[in-house]
Image (tube, helix red, strand yellow):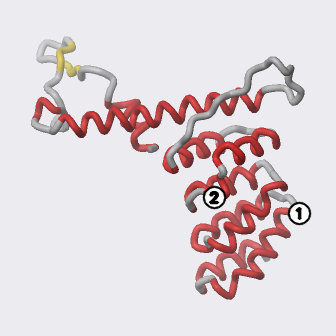
Amino acid sequence: AARAALRCALGAAGPRRALGPRGGWVLAPPPPSSPAAGEPLQSQRQAGAECGLARQVSAEVTKWIRVNRRPRKRRRREKNEVFEKLLPDQLVLLLEHLLEQKTLKPQTLQSLQRTYRLQEQDAEVRHRWCELVVKHRHAQAHRHVERFLLEDQAMGVYLYGELMVSEDARQQQLARRCFELAKVQMDGPSADLVAQMLF
């Protein structure tokens, strides 16, 4: 999905131009991947669909940022945002964008989790969700981090480091507790690496 967003931003911007023999701009020949050069139209439609999926994520990011900026007490008449159902790749992209935000309120994180049921998604999505939880010290979702560290040990190594650099005593204790439970099931190099981070 991230590649699709880049392709959307760079590739589908209209006709290509090139510098002509006399220094002026002229239309460049179609790229080899265009339908005019023999590529099936279906691949162009697929690229357009991927751009649409990336645009949908961008719209959802904007909604979440708007929700995060709202004051805690809202007037009753203010309408709630309606969020779209997203595919797993779109959720990864959404969470990566939200990781770039300096602060997300606990209420925003709770709504995010409830809306997409993040703890029930695939490992890639849950990993990004756990990164958000750690970054914003969202203690209510520490159980999701614990589950991830115990069940997805190969992907959890990086998360141990995040927990330790957070300089939050509860998160550091969580990392140590999970490591004690999981280290017997971890491969040697991973266990050694995590032990160096924790102690």
Up-down relation of residue 22 to residue 171 (above or below): above
Up-down relation of residue 17 to residue 55 (above or below): above
Q: Position of residue 157 (x, y in %)?
A: 64, 70
Up-down relation of residue 60 to residue 178 (above or below): above
- The residues bearing labels 2 and 1 have C-alpha atoms spaced at a distance of 27 Å
Quarter of the image holding residue 77? top right
For the C terminus, the image quarter is bottom right
Quarter of the image holding residue 134? bottom right
The three-letter amino acid code for the residue at tag 2 is: Glu
> Which residue is painted at 42% across and 32% down in the image?
52
> Which residue is painted at 28% across and 34% down in the image?
45
Q: Residues within 10 Å of mark 1 (few under 14, many from 20)?
A: few
> Which residue is painted at 71% across and 48% down in the image?
113
Mark 1 lies on residue: 169
Q: Position of residue 114 (x, y in %)?
A: 71, 46
The label shown at residue 58 is none
Q: Nearer the viewer, residue 153 or 157?
A: 153
For the N terminus, the image quarter is top left
Mark 2 lies on residue: 120
Q: How many marks?
A: 2
> Is residue 120 shown left or right of residue 179?
left
Q: Position of residue 123 (x, y in %)?
A: 57, 62
Which type of secondary structure does the marked residue at label 2 adopt? helix
Which type of secondary structure does the marked residue at label 1 adopt? helix
